[in-house]
Image (cartoon, coloured by chain):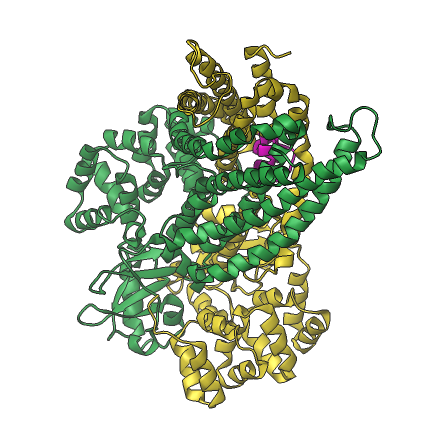
Chain colours: A yellow, B green
Amino acid sequence: MENNKLTLEMLLNYIHTKDVPALRSVFENFEEIDVAELCDKIENPADLLFIFRTVKSDYTAELFAYLTSSQQEKLINLFTDKQLIELIKNSYTDDIVDFLIDMPANLVSRVLNVSDTTIRSDINRLLNYKEGTAGSIMTTEFVLLQDNMTVNDALSTIRKIGREKETISTNFIVDLKRNLVGIVSIDDLIYSEPETKLNAIMHSDFITTNVNSDQEEVAQAFKRYDLNVMPVLNDDRRLIGIVTIDDVMDVIEQETSEDILKMAAISPLEDSYTNSSAFTLAKKSLPWLLILIVLGAFSTIILNRFEHAFQQVVILAAFIPVLMDTGGNAGYQSSALITRGIALNEIEKKDFGHVVFKELRVALLVGLGVGLFAFLWIFIEIATGIIVYENIGAAFSSTWWLEISKIAGLVSLTLFTAVLLSKVIGGSLPLIAIAIKKDPAVMAGPFVTTIVDASSLLLYFLFSNIIFNLY
Amino acid sequence: MENNKLTLEMLLNYIHTKDVPALRSVFENFEEIDVAELCDKIENPADLLFIFRTVKSDYTAELFAYLTSSQQEKLINLFTDKQLIELIKNSYTDDIVDFLIDMPANLVSRVLNVSDTTIRSDINRLLNYKEGTAGSIMTTEFVLLQDNMTVNDALSTIRKIGREKETISTNFIVDLKRNLVGIVSIDDLIYSEPETKLNAIMHSDFITTNVNSDQEEVAQAFKRYDLNVMPVLNDDRRLIGIVTIDDVMDVIEQETSEDILKMAAISPLEDSYTNSSAFTLAKKSLPWLLILIVLGAFSTIILNRFEHAFQQVVILAAFIPVLMDTGGNAGYQSSALITRGIALNEIEKKDFGHVVFKELRVALLVGLGVGLFAFLWIFIEIATGIIVYENIGAAFSSTWWLEISKIAGLVSLTLFTAVLLSKVIGGSLPLIAIAIKKDPAVMAGPFVTTIVDASSLLLYFLFSNIIFNLY
């Protein structure tokens, strides 16, 4: 977090003066991701190619994985087959797949053509797992050991093949039929005597996942059990890949972003905000606003049907915003709490009763607080003339406080009931969503507001009909 | 993810029948966190104590770390000093500190009294780091090597002391003055020849953090550089602890939860939803609702001042909800996007100009879409009589479409302008917040709605004054 600064100018200068030693030392002194961020800004792909031609390929393979897809595409188009082979040899299969997903078909087939058979079949398989499954985030590079090996055999195997694998922190033990029978950490290998058999020290109770499982479930298990690696099994329960914690962290971020955006009525973005065009952002935002305008018709119709109320007591209209906002905010509070609880696996479908009962108690407390405060606040607003109330007139009558109390009482009562209703609706909707297998975040967001708005307005007019005896 | 089920009944049955072998096998077959979840439901602390008396203490130490604070407190009160010493010896220092934070002072001093001097001073130091700093999440148990050691020496040291340390995946190399000069992974030790000196294979460019750094910064660095461990230095740049990825994952979850709750106008919870009482939840929610009611006065005052508009064109009131909701939703969309971008380090203060310009372009597209759609939608609503408009009357006059167009045009124009304004305000506020060192999530949430509501209403009345020529 405290390196000397590397700038784009420095980097371009090294390239243009063909200062290869300086360029190589950049990769020794800086993290690849930091260099990649500068490389993304290089406009001439030939400059970028110069780096790939002169710097060691284990550095450039990592650099490549961090570039944006458009830079990757430009580069690959300039690569000779030899350079492409070198890149593939030095990259992890899951990184290759990650960049191929965004590439045009001709590039994908060129990459597949130059890859050797094993890599090609791995890439093909990984490309075919549905997005969002364990298969789509797993890698096929792990250390496989036999259960009749000794610790010494295992360590020699790891010394021989470990460098090409994504991790050696956890290693996988199969029997003669290639069934996964245990896992052994590098720690356990180091602490054990060389001649010990693996099946004496391996762990046979370990958490696995199916290749078609939801990546969110995988992430939950990583967090719950503090895992670093998880084996992925196919339907025949054979080991076909592993998921590592760095990929899980990306999944968690991505899922959280999706939840936050859905709650804000935006469809999930495929890319970061910075890399999404204004047109894409508009396309993700507009449909939800239109749906919500259509759903807003309920509120419009309620107000329209109760027009006579405003005509008789004009001041009623002034409190519509505070009713809608408070109801909406109270409902959104509850739905955000519950949706987050669901995302963190703290709340499940079966907790429905508990959650609704708790929200009801919270709502009673909050509703009372809001109601009492609003009564005082509105009384003061009208009494001081901040809000003009014709019924009182310029000269206060002897019952002025009663007139004000009627309005303040009406708003306060509506707020109390609206908070009660909003919190119960806001707390229930996300749980109803998971019960009917819908996304809780979508239900938790603006839909809560829409329902709560209409209900609050309806309550408002029902109460005002009673209090003001409207016809 | 697919173990046989363990139930509370089974567990209590083993305890009451004093079936020690069955109890021990539970810990061999199930993950500690799963057992802990059941143990949290055990009501009689003596039952819980029985587990701690009979099961191996490396299992129970981990079990203890997963229990709720109230169960931990009950247990410790029943522990003999000997049991307490055994627990402390088998726990990681950071886990001890995590549970001590929630304990009453007399318990803390009892734990400190029975701990040996090294552990005591570690606990004391960790207890004193401010919450939210690297110091508060670090652990003091790591492997320290000398730079003049050989690979063989290093491996022997690790074999000797590694088991008590939190990790051996990364080991730390100091010179004679105890300055941190390099790190070496267990992988590199395994791949190297036994007689190689550590300073020939160690990495000397590594990411570190200061003990007082913000834990969120630490988490960002873990994600950016795909780290598993990070050394923590004091102000003299001496190594005093390490942060490991499991603690970082907790930090990320906690910070994300805080952001989501703040955006939903709730103060961060100290505990999970399930463990927070209704009273606590109310206390975290109510103040924000009251602040927002006070800020809502702007909207109330605007509506109050424009009462004459409703009296002349009654239908105007019916569209207040759709204006407020659409403006609020559009603003919230932008602020959620930007706040999340800030949390993921994709957007910084210096991007202000770019972001506002992009939001403006998005707003133009979205505003046009919303405006056109709303015009048609409202035209249809009125023409079909879903919304009653007195100006048209029962029998349509020859200019009925013109009358409807005036209303639909007014709402549509206001919506277009409101979306434009909302998205620019919603996009700017979080960035203004970080510029004045405030929390973007707090600014991004309901404050956006409040400002946007008042502006939309003001625009509505200004436009309606022009279109309907109101006095």
Residue A219 vertical placement versus B381 (above, below): below
Q: Is residue B126 left or right of residue A241?
A: left
Q: Position of residue A417 (x, y in %)?
A: 52, 20
On the image, the x and y values in percent for residue B308 come to 58, 28
Pick the quarter of the image with the N terminus of chain A.
bottom left
- For residue B120, side relative to residue A165 (left or right): left
The quarter of the rendered structure image containing the C terminus of chain A is top right
Q: Nearer the viewer, residue A123 or A61?
A: A61
- Work out whether A282 lies above or below B172: above
Residue range corresponding to the magenta coloring: A429-451
The quarter of the picture where residue B311 lies is top right
Residue farthest to the front, as pictured? B471
Residue at horizontal 36%, vertical 77%?
B193
Main SS, magenta region, reads helix
Q: Residue at x 42, y 15 (%)?
A: A396
Is residue A238 in view? no
Residue B143: quarter of image: bottom left
Q: Residue at x 64, y 68 (%)?
A: A100
State whether residue B399 appears in this view.
yes
Q: Which of the 4 image quadrants contains residue B466?
A: top right
Question: Residue A340, percent across and down?
Answer: 50, 39
Residue A438 covered by magenta stretch: yes
In the shown orientation, is residue A397 left or right of residue B49?
Answer: right
Q: Nearer the viewer, residue B1 or A441?
A: A441
Q: Is residue A268 magenta?
A: no
Q: Nearer the viewer, residue A311 or A237?
A: A311
Residue that appears at 57% across and 77% down? A87
Would you say A96 lies left or right of B291 here? right
